[in-house]
Amino acid sequence: MPSLWQGFYLDGRSATRHPVSIQLTTAALHIVKADGHTIRWPYSEIVQTHGAYEGEQIRLEYGAPLPQTVILQDSTFLAAIQQISGSSATPFHNPRQRPLRLRLTILAGMVLLGMMGGFYMWGIPGLAKLVAPHIPVSWEEQLGMSVLEQIAPSEKRCVDQTRLAALESIVARLSRAVPDSPYRIRLTVVNRPTVNAFALPGGQVVVFRGLLEATETPEQFASVLAHELQHIYKQHSTRSLIEQASTSLLIAAATGDFTGGVAYGIEGARVLGVLRYSRLHEGEADREGLRLLQAVGIDPAEMVAFYQIMQAQHPHDDAASSYLSTHPDTSDRIEKLTALAVAPPPHPVKLFSLEEWKELRSLCQHSVASSPHAAMDSSQ
Amino acid sequence: MKASCTYCGALFVVVAMPTAIPDNNVSFHAASEVPDPGLQLVEQEVVSAENAQPLGAVSRKTVFHGAGGTLFGIHLINTLLTLVTLGIYYYWAKVRVRAFLFSQTEFAGDRFSYHGSARELLNGTIKASLVFGIPYFLMGNAGQFLEGSTAIQVTLKVAASLLLILFIPVAITGARRYRLSRTAWRGIRFSFRGKTLDFIKLWLSGYFLTAVTLGLYYPYFSTKKHAFLTTHSYFGSEPFKFSGDGVALSRPFLRMYLLAVAVAGVVGLGLYSFVDLPGQNIEDPEAMGSFVFGAIASLMIGALVSRLLWLPYSVIEQRFFWEQTSIGSARFQLPITTWPYLKLKLGNLLLMLCTLGFAWPWITIRNIRFITDQLELVGIDNFDEIVQAYDGAPPIGEGLDGFLDTGFDLG
């Protein structure tokens, strides 16, 4: 190992590089300039700014705010300074610790992966579950109303009072089973052929004519309502908003950036997060909806029967595509619900007779819509 | 090309390349502090400085030494500590990344060094939040809680927008002032000495003219901005110079502009029917899903097309800006071309999408290397004559007096 190293000295006043020789003593670095002038830097006052990585030049700084600098290329210098200076070598990087640093970095990576995985799997849904109950119901109602106006404009609503009241009685029967809920459930039936229903935050349940007419029994319709009510009770919409924001923040924290190309990556991860959490909510609404049916004495098999009707209408949905969907695979849902349904109640509740139901589900064909066109049509 | 001997002060011109090249990164090490036989021969060719004509050129190159894996390691530790400290470590993380990137960038055989601190970045964020962030938030949201007339609410919203517009030039100059003051090469700090008020005037007038001309003023505005930022930047005592104006960029910009208008017209017409169809079933959430998907797809296609059209112009602009920049008697050159730049950006996008953003360290290094591999300073530099011109006092923490001309960075 050499006792003298060659390098460059920068005085912090001009940009001129001075070739120097560097000597090591037990307490200080001696920098010998070409003219023989020697500068002494005590080890304790030196800061090593470069040279922690293999092959990197070593850069030592002395003084502040405009430091003098010494630059060396010889990597053996660091080992030598550790050896010569002993305990006073603390400001210098020890090249022997590089493997340890690598191991620590790998460990940090694994811990980080575990943390992020845990946060993604349980932390974000848990956080949303924790925060959502503290959101005022009035905010949710306001949000729900604004969405309702968009999705179910008044001229598209089926408003036949007699039939609607009968359907609302099913809602009332289900909601009575959850007496401590702060939500007032309101049902809206929309005159659209789509087989769908959804819940809006704050207590709005929207059912499309297509779905209403697809149900064969009032209990099947109740099972749909039970599922949607659970979305409201479990605050799934509000939780979704919190989950989406948290996923974006998590990915942004992991990537360290919010801009440019990173935004695409964040968006991709957010969408995957949204899909996953949405499927979790659907699963929960199924389970809890089924329990709600059991609580009011309706045979849970009615829920399974309705999903079978849905599956018959969309036979090409497969399990693989369900990972990229907001809803779980229908076969999977049927399987899980069948397992949960176990034995039917001894005296299952019958809400209406089949004849009555046929009459009730034709609600939209008897509706008097509130739009001027509809009013004109009815007067003719 | 004129220069002076660093030892005797005699003026000389470079007439031939030396036979011995001192190191890999400097094609011709003029004004070297180490006497070089080849250079001594050149120095003998002294002619009258007034009549001197450039006969040779010195090329000083930039090299980036950092590896993506190393940056990824730093990034892992940073992320872990940022999450554990609930975000507080973010500023320390930023400093670590900057210090690494600067220390791995070499110009003419010497590496850059970063002297910023996390405390300064944190102060900068607090300062900007107090002066801009909080007033912006208050003005933007106060309307909801006030029972006043619509006029008051609109005034507040407009004031918030104006504050935001004003914040951008302040942030640009503040960040530049701070970052340059914390960047050193050969121990000499860079600095930015432009007046923020002048930049705000330039910014507002440029914005106005760009809007009035439907974007056609943009190349002039962008060149003026760049010229202002460059000519007020210094390396020690030596200012950077900028010699270009927007005329040179106006033709490529117009070409891109007209093409973009034509493409927007065609894409718009093509998408009209596609967007219109789901519009019939807007009340149906299922159809709304496909409508939203369609709208997002259209927007993404639109963004991608604009981005693709912007790329060739952006290459021309970057090349032009560097090639009009000089220091002393040396001028920068950045001979980048469109196709490699396009490949870089598409590769980055692919990496980002496939790794959900985790390839960020490699992408950062790819971007830096693309520039450093091609950037060079050609001409006779006067680095050995440059002296430190750092005013000593850090620009942070001096209170809000003169906020506009203090450097700050948001991290």
Image: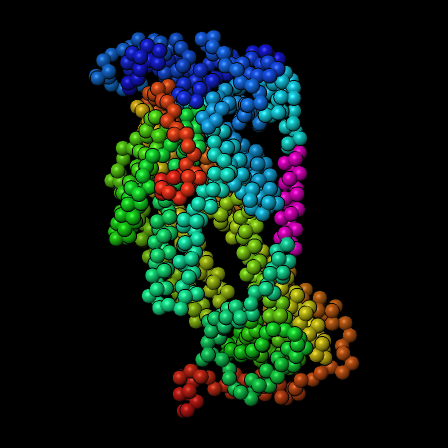
Residue B87: % across, % down: 56, 46
Is residue B100 covered in magenta?
no
Is residue A107 covered in magenta?
yes
* Structure colour scheme: rainbow
* In the image, farthest residue toward the bottom: A380
Residue B396 seen in render? yes
Report the side of A68 relative to A127 (left or right).
left
Depth order, front residue of B405/B305 = B405
Report the side of A251 relative to A332 (left or right).
left
Query: Is residue B14 placed above or below A199 in the rendered structure?
Result: above
Instruction: State which quadrant residue A83 falls in.
Output: top right
Which residue is found at the position 77% from the left and 72% from the top? Answer: A342
Which residue is found at the position 24% from the left and 40% from the top? Answer: B247
Q: Which residues are magenta?
A: A103-122
Which residue is found at the position 59% from the left and 20% from the top? Answer: A78
Number of numbered discs on residues: 0
Residue A118: % across, % down: 66, 51
Residue A110: % across, % down: 66, 42
Depth order, front residue of A311/A15 = A15
Which residue is found at the position 24% from the left and 12% from the top? Answer: B47
Q: Quadrant of the N terminus of chain B?
A: top left
Residue B403: % across, % down: 38, 43
Residue B341 seen in render? no
Depth order, front residue of A139/B339 = A139
Query: Is residue A13 placed above or below A251 in the rendered structure?
Result: above
* In the image, farthest residue toward the left: B51
Instruction: State which quadrant residue B158 falls in.
Output: bottom left
Depth order, front residue of B162/B51 = B162
| Secondary structure mostly seen in the magenta stretch | helix
